[in-house]
Amino acid sequence: MIDSDDVRRIALSLPETVEKEAWSMPTFRVAGKMYVTVPDDETSVAVRCPRHERTELIAAEPEKFWVPPHEASSAWVRVRLAALEDVAELRDILVDSWRQAAPERLLEAHPDLVPGGAVGP
């Protein structure tokens, strides 16, 4: 079962990621930009996701992805940890979110860090 410890381990393995508590929950940031939060009871995560892609994700896999009403105008999506296939899928989701927040210099320094890459730590 994938849990918040897996989220923390993978997020902190990504370049220049730091953990910072905000709104009484763990958040993970790269270069000061948040790219994942572990809200509520730690059964889900919120990650960056362009709104046009988010709509497609939710339509394709509503058991896995959703958006709470208070986040509807944001470019974030929630992911139910229990619905993920494995840690590799979680890593892909976190890497995708990290890439959306990371500055160009980090993307250039880590061109191999992409969804579908090797499962790290």
Image (tube, rainbow, N blue to C red):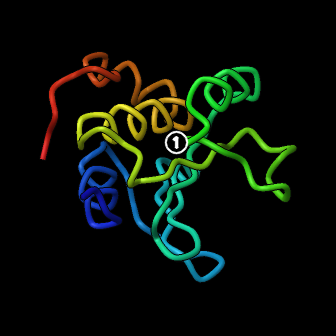
Secondary element at image label 1: loop
Q: Position of residue 3 (x, y in %)?
A: 31, 63
| Quadrant housing residue 51 | top right
Q: Residue at x 29, y 25 (%)?
A: 113
Q: Which residue is mark 1?
A: 64
Residue type of the residue flagged with mark 1: Lys
Vertical side of 32 occupied by 88: above or below: above
Q: Residue at x 28, y 20 (%)?
A: 116
* Front residue of this view, candidates 19 and 25: 25
* Front residue of this view, candidates 4 and 104: 4
Q: Is residue 103 left or right of residue 108?
A: right
Q: What count of labels does the image hold?
A: 1
Q: Residue furthest bottom?
A: 24
Q: Position of residue 54 (x, y in %)?
A: 68, 29
Q: Residues within 10 Å of mark 1 (few under 14, many from 20)?
A: some
Q: Residue at x 24, y 58 (%)?
A: 1
Q: Residue at x 41, y 46 (%)?
A: 83
Q: Position of residue 27 (x, y in %)?
A: 51, 64
Q: Is residue 114 left or right of residue 26?
A: left
Q: Is residue 81 left or right of residue 116?
A: right
Q: Position of residue 105 (x, y in %)?
A: 43, 26
